[in-house]
Every structure is written in structure tokens, then in C-alpha cells.
Image: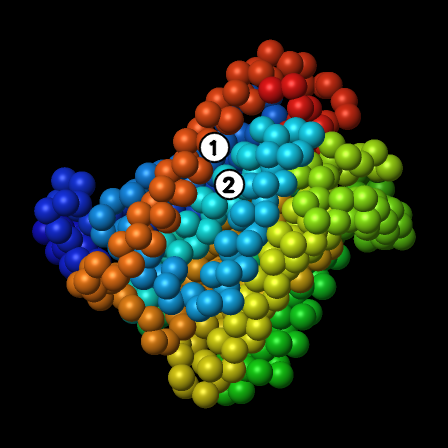
């Protein structure tokens, strides 16, 4: 009975109508799907295909297709149309230019199916961001669910890591840091996911009135999650963290003291776990070094030099294809100086692939989000908005800075986390219509609503068809085929599909 009451209360907040599926709000379904993804995605690695990266991408696509279809429901389509109208003239114009230029670039590119799939994914990511901002607005239950799901996903990562350590210790065997942990987790998923998730682990303390035992458990989780960052030692994540701390320290006002204190507990706890781990669990001289040493010390300037080479490659593409770029998702198809399939810099990737027009619009949108994040931190410090805005804004800033060194906006898990955090931030802004208000608004822009739904359903169809074609084409391909560094798919430079 209590569970039924909570569901009814949540559904009422989003205005159930007879047109909703089985009398249950479309928003509740959408939030359930999203929360499920956030929980299982960090440890999702079934044997659907040879490559874990493709499995991660397929899970992302399943989420986006689900949200795209749900957006066609009357309640969701009205709310998305309202949210679109509230974005303001400049963001709407930039989004339209980005998508239109990307579509033209994709059609005229050397591998059009890759470009069309990429720009269709972008449309669905924007759709998800608008839906999240609608669900967050004036609905604390949505924020609670998102916070819980992110913490649950982090908990599964931590449990999986320590369980694997225990198994290898029981077998008196060395833990394989490079494969599969480092190969998949560090380079293609883990650190880039962490850049958006690390600062949100202690968010429940700001959302709920937790007792001491619950706070201790949350601190333990945050410390363990931070310990993995100490072990992996990705420099891009540290750079993003320092910028986020600086932003809160400068603009956080009365909120900065508590925020810094809570984050410091997780950071320091992670360092303690890391030191104990290196002392007790890896005592022998011949034990394999944890990846921090390899990543930060042994590689030295190697990775920096590689990024300089990739930057020069991206700039060369911009000079040769200034207006339309080489095509969405096709950096790797036009680059061979290193094994990289993307330039590890989201700004350069957008401009080199979409051209100065479309890519420039994307970079301006990211810059506007960064400015909005700073504004959210300042507003929370003056009491004009919720203190939650500080945590969400700091997470967005950290992830955006990290993307300048890793290109995390091309990876499946970090793409979703970026949209979750960006939509959350937009939903916290004052002066926007809630989902209930959107439902009651008259047919204010029915043509806009129809256009948006049409574009979203077109993107759903294209993503479904092109994904099927790719999976069908590579299903029998050998897993050792080289060189195939991942970009959109594991076979980042394979175009015969």
C-alpha cells in the first residue's frame, strides 16, 4: 500500500491522463528506464558481441531508443515542446545549426552511414536532456531517484572491483590491471564516467536528512570510488577536479565550505584506501604495478606528445574541410598518425568532424553550459536556488574540463552522464514551466511540437536500422582484427557496413 501511494504521488506530480500507458505516467516509465541504466551501466559487459565497448554502446542505444519512443507520448511531447521554447533564441539557433550542419556533413561525407548514425544519436541525446530537465523541475523525487541510481552504480563498480581482487588473491594470482580492467575501464569508460559521477556520490547528504550510520556508509562508498581514481590516476580527471574545486571556491559563497568538506572526506578516504592497498595487497617486488604508476610516471610526456599529434591532425582536417568537416564520427576514417579514432578533445573533434559552422555551434553550446553551471553555483550561494545546484554544476564543470583532454563526449557512458547532469542543471533553473504546467498550456506551438516529435522519431528509426546493419556486418568478424580503436563503435575505422 505504501509503495502504491508513492507511485500515485509521483504520477500525480507529472499529471496522469487517460492517454498514458496503462494509467501510469510516461514520466515514471522514463525515469525508471533511465535509473535502471545508471545502475547497471557501470558493470554492463554481456557477451552480446566480442567487444565490451560495443556492448556498452548497445546499452546506450537501447536507452535512447526507449526515451525517444516515450517522447512521442502526448504528455512528454508537450513538455519537450515547452522546454524547447524556454531554451531561448540563441541556444535553439545553435542546436538547430549544429544538427542541420551535422546532417548535411554526414550525407556528403565518405562514410555517410557512420555520420547519419552519429547525428541521429546527437538528436536523441538532446531529446533525453530536455526530458530530464522536465522531470527534475520542481520534483524532488526525480532528483532523489537520479542520485540513488548514480550511487548504486558506483557501489556496483566498487563491489565488482574488490570482489575481483579477492578472487585473484584467493587463487594466488596477479590481478590483470591492463586487461580487462584498464583496457576497458580506464581508456574507454571508467575515468570518463568518473569525471561526471565522482562529485555526485555525496549528493544524498544534501538531498536527504540522513542519520549518522547512513552518512558513514555514503562516505565509505565515496572513499572507495575515489580510491579507484587514485589507483588509475588519470590526469584529465584530476585537472577537471581542480577546476571544479576552484569554481566552487570562487563562486560558492556560503555553500563552498560544506561542499569542499564533504568532497574532501571522500578524496582523503580514497587516498587512505589506496595507500593501504599498495602496502598490504601488493607487498612483493615482483607484483604488477597498479596503473597509476604506468599512467603518470612511466609514460611521462608520451601521452602529451600523442595529444599534440592528434591536435595537429584535427587542425589539418579543419584546414582541408573548413565548412562541413570530415563527417560526424569520422575522425578515425581520415587520420592515421596514431591509433586514436578521435582527437581526445571534444571541441576539436566537433569542429574537425562537423566543420566550423556546426562544430562551432556545438562548442558555443558547451561554453554556454559551462557559464550556466557557474551561474548555478553563484545562485545557490545566494539562496536563489537549491544547494543541489552546486553539486550538479561542479560535476558538469569537471566533466567538461576532462573532455578537453579525453574527448569523453564520444564515449557511451559519459555521453549519458553528460546529458543527465546537463538536463539536471537546466531543470534547476528558476522560472520554467513544470510538466504539469506544460500539460495545461494551450496548443501553443503545435507546429513546433509536431516538428520535434517527427525529428525524434526519424532519429529513432535511423539509429535502429543502422545499428542493426553494423551488428549484422561485424557479428562474424575476428576480435583480433587490427587496427580498430573505438570511436562510435569498437571497429572505429571499419566502414563496410
Q: Are marks 1 and 2 in contact (CB under 8 Å)?
A: yes
Q: Earlier in the sequence, mark 1 or mark 2?
A: 2
Q: Quadrant of the C terminus?
A: top right
Give the secondary structure at mark 2.
helix
Give the secondary structure at mark 1.
helix
Locate residue 144: give its quadrant: bottom left
**Residue at 65%, 76% in the rendered image:** 246
**Residue at 59%, 41% in the rendered image:** 104
**Disc 1 designates what residue?**
463
**Disc 2 designates what residue?**
121
Q: Position of residue 214 (x, y in %)?
A: 39, 64
Task: Give the left or right position of residue 240, taking residue 388 as reference.
Answer: right
Decide which of 59, 346 is in the foreground and name it: 346
Q: Position of residue 450 (x, y in %)?
A: 31, 47
Decide which of 243, 82 is in the foreground and name it: 82
In the picture shown, does residue 2 fall above or below 61? below
Task: Give the left or right position of residue 273, taking residue 215 as reference.
Answer: right
- Other residues around mark 2 within 10 Å, as few (<14) / some (14–19) / many (≥20): many
**Residue at 54%, 59% in the rendered image:** 94
Decide which of 133, 398 is in the foreground and name it: 133
Amino acid at each position: 500500500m505504501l509503495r502504491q501511494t508513492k507511485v500515485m504521488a509521483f504520477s500525480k506530480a507529472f499529471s496522469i491522463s487517460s492517454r498514458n500507458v496503462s494509467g501510469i505516467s510516461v514520466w515514471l516509465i522514463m525515469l525508471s528506464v533511465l535509473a535502471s541504466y545508471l545502475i547497471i551501466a557501470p558493470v554492463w559487459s554481456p557477451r552480446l558481441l566480442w567487444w565490451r565497448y560495443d556492448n556498452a554502446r548497445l546499452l546506450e542505444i537501447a536507452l535512447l531508443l526507449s526515451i525517444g519512443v516515450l517522447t512521442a507520448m502526448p504528455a512528454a511531447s508537450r513538455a519537450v515542446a515547452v522546454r524547447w521554447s524556454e531554451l531561448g533564441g540563441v541556444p535553439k539557433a545553435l542546436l538547430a545549426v549544429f544538427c542541420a550542419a551535422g546532417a548535411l556533413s554526414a550525407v556528403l561525407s565518405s562514410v555517410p552511414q557512420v555520420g547519419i548514425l552519429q547525428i541521429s544519436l546527437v538528436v536523441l541525446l538532446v531529446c533525453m536532456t530536455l526530458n530530464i530537465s522536465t522531470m527534475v523541475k520542481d520534483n524532488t523525487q526525480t532528483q532523489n531517484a537520479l542520485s540513488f541510481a548514480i550511487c548504486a552504480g558506483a557501489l556496483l563498480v566498487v563491489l565488482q572491483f574488490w570482489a575481483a581482487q579477492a578472487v585473484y588473491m584467493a587463487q594466488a594470482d596477479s590481478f590483470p590491471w591492463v586487461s580487462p580492467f584498464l583496457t576497458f575501464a580506464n581508456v574507454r569508460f571508467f575515468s570518463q564516467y568518473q569525471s561526471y559521477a565522482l562529485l555526485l556520490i555525496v549528493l544524498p547528504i544534501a538531498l536527504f536528512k540522513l542519520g549518522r550510520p547512513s552518512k558513514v556508509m555514503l562516505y565509505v562508498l565515496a572513499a572507495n570510488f575515489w580510491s579507484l581514481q587514485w589507483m588509475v590516476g588519470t590526469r584529465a580527471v584530476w585537472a577537471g577536479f581542480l577546476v571544479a574545486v576552484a569554481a566552487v571556491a570562487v563562486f560558492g559563497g556560503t555553500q563552498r565550505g560544506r561542499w569542499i568538506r564533504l568532497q574532501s572526506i571522500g578524496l582523503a578516504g580514497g587516498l587512505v584506501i589506496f595507500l593501504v592497498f599498495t602496502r598490504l595487497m601488493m607487498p612483493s617486488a615482483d607484483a604488477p604495478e597498479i596503473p597509476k604508476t604506468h599512467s603518470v610516471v612511466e609514460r611521462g610526456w608520451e601521452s602529451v606528445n600523442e595529444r599534440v599529434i592528434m591536435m595537429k591532425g584535427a587542425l589539418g582536417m579543419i584546414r582541408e574541410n573548413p565548412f562541413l568537416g570530415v563527417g560526424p564520427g569520422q575522425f578515425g576514417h581520415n587520420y592515421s598518425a596514431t591509433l586514436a579514432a578521435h582527437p581526445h578533445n571534444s571541441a576539436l573533434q566537433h569542429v574537425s568532424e562537423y566543420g566550423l559552422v556546426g562544430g562551432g555551434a556545438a562548442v558555443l553550446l558547451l561554453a554556454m553550459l559551462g557559464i550556466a553551471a557557474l551561474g548555478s553555483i553563484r545562485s545557490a550561494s545566494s539562496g536563489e536556488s537549491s544547494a543541489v545546484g552546486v553539486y550538479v554544476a561542479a560535476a558538469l564543470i569537471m566533466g567538461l574540463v576532462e573532455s578537453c583532454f579525453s574527448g569523453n563526449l564520444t564515449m557511451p557512458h559519459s555521453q549519458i552522464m553528460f546529458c543527465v547532469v546537463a538536463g539536471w542543471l537546466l531543470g534547476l533553473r528558476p522560472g520554467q514551466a513544470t510538466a504539469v504546467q506544460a500539460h495545461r498550456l494551450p496548443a501553443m506551438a503545435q507546429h513546433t511540437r509536431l516538428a520535434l516529435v517527427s525529428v525524434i522519431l526519424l532519429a529513432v528509426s535511423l539509429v535502429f536500422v543502422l545499428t542493426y546493419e553494423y551488428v549484422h556486418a561485424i557479428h562474424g568478424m575476428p576480435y583480433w582484427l587490427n587496427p580498430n580503436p573505438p570511436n562510435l563503435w569498437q571497429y572505429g575505422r571499419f566502414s563496410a557496413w
